[in-house]
Amino acid sequence: MPAVTVPTVTVPTLTARAVVADGAGGLAVETVLVEPPGRGEVLVEVRASGVCHTDLDGLRRWCTRPTVLGHEGAGVVAAVGEGVQHVAPGDHVLLTWAIACGRCVPCSEGAPTLCEVLGGERGHAHPGSTRRPDGTPLDRWFNLGTMATATVVRAEAVVPIPADVPFPSACLLGCAVMTGFGSVVNAARVRAGSTVAVLGCGGVGLNVVQAARLAGARRVVAIDVDPARAEAARRFGATDVLRPERGDTSLRGLRADLERIGGGRLLDYAFECTGVPALAVAPLACIRNGGTAVQVSGTEERVTVDMTLFEWDKTYLNPLYGQCRPSVDFPVLVDLYRRGQLLLDELVSRTYPLEAAAEAFADAAAGTTSKGVLLP
Ligand SMILES: [Zn+2]
Ligand SMILES: [Zn+2]
């Protein structure tokens, strides 16, 4: 296809509303100023931003300076900076937080989430193009800051999507869906006919469930201490539902049930999606010799491990962002959604206006919503 030259448009500094973490655990919805996009940047009018567990972690622990929260967003391109050719004003887009240089060794080997050039520019914050009216620069979470009516992001973070995908559903592709689906399909490479356990049926866990179904697993066991959440997983493809005793972090109490479901043996795969550090190694207790345990939560705490859990020949993976390759994976996810095979609309348990961000975070922290979405 010949390169298309998109005229750049000069836009003035905008006034926007944004959810700002104060750097000390609190948040407020503030009026902010957003600079026009520079070279290689895109101004996006955000229409939906999911509330992800990582936003909660950011609010509570990691954002030590004032930061616009949100890293799971979708919206409309309002303007593009010089040199941006793959999107134009009016395009519907989702935002991906794992931008990559495309040239370093991991990028060249097809592992852009491990990019050694731009990887360090993710999570933690760089002064961006958003500031307070008094001039204070604001960091943007994952260099996106999607919990705002507008944000300027690097062109590499912008992925065009068809206009018929509703924004609240589209935004989830950018983190929860990609993380869950990619952990199953890209990282663990779940085989047709296999047996799978999924620990935790929140926003990411439900996507692990539906990806395991799409991969052809014959049994998908949803495990959650909340029976309603586990039952809800049936709609996404769970064939069995188990409820562990609270406090049974080893999950040894589920062993007999898992062996029954597995036809006399433990399961082939188990995915931990609970966000509970003490459960980081629990998937090892669910799998047979030679099975694969996947820790999807991104646990970073110290955990004491009983090494017999690894016996024998078990594989333990902790994939980053489902090993996302934006140009490969997002078109697949959009196609599966449009063909009715990937449930997205059903993932959204509640939407909130941007001004109700505090309530959305409180609900996410309490676990009363599997997936809340802010509508800036
Ligand atoms: Zn996330
Ligand atoms: Zn790279």
Image (cartoon, helix red, strand yellow):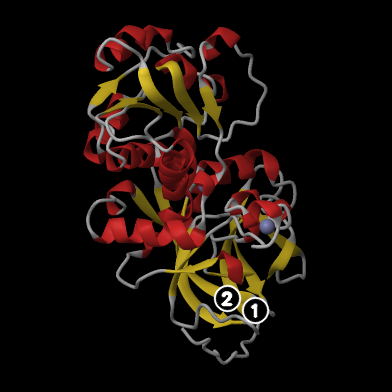
- Relative horizontal placement of residue 54, taking residue 36 as reference (left or right): left
Q: Quadrant of residue 218?
A: top left
The picture places residue 320, in percent across and down from the top left corner, at 57, 43
Residue behind mark 2: 43
Between 13 and 166, the one nearer to me in the picture: 166
Residue type at numbered disc 1: Pro
- Element type at marker 1? loop
Choose top left, top right, bottom left or bottom right for residue 213: top left
Q: Please tell me which residue is depicted at 51% across the width and 88% down the height of the picture.
A: 4
Q: Residue at x 52, y 78 (%)?
A: 86
Which label number is shown at residue 370? Answer: none
Q: Earlier in the sequence, mark 1 or mark 2?
A: 1
Q: Residues within 10 Å of mark 1 (few under 14, many from 20)?
A: many
Q: Position of residue 282 (x, y in %)?
A: 49, 18
In the shown orientation, is residue 64 left or right of residue 108?
A: right
Residues at discs 1 and 2 in contact (Cβ within 8 Å) = yes
Residue in the picture at 51% in, 19% down:
314
Residue where numbered disc 1 is placed: 37
Q: What is the three-letter code of the residue carrying label 2?
A: Leu
Residue 294, image x, y percentages: 49, 30
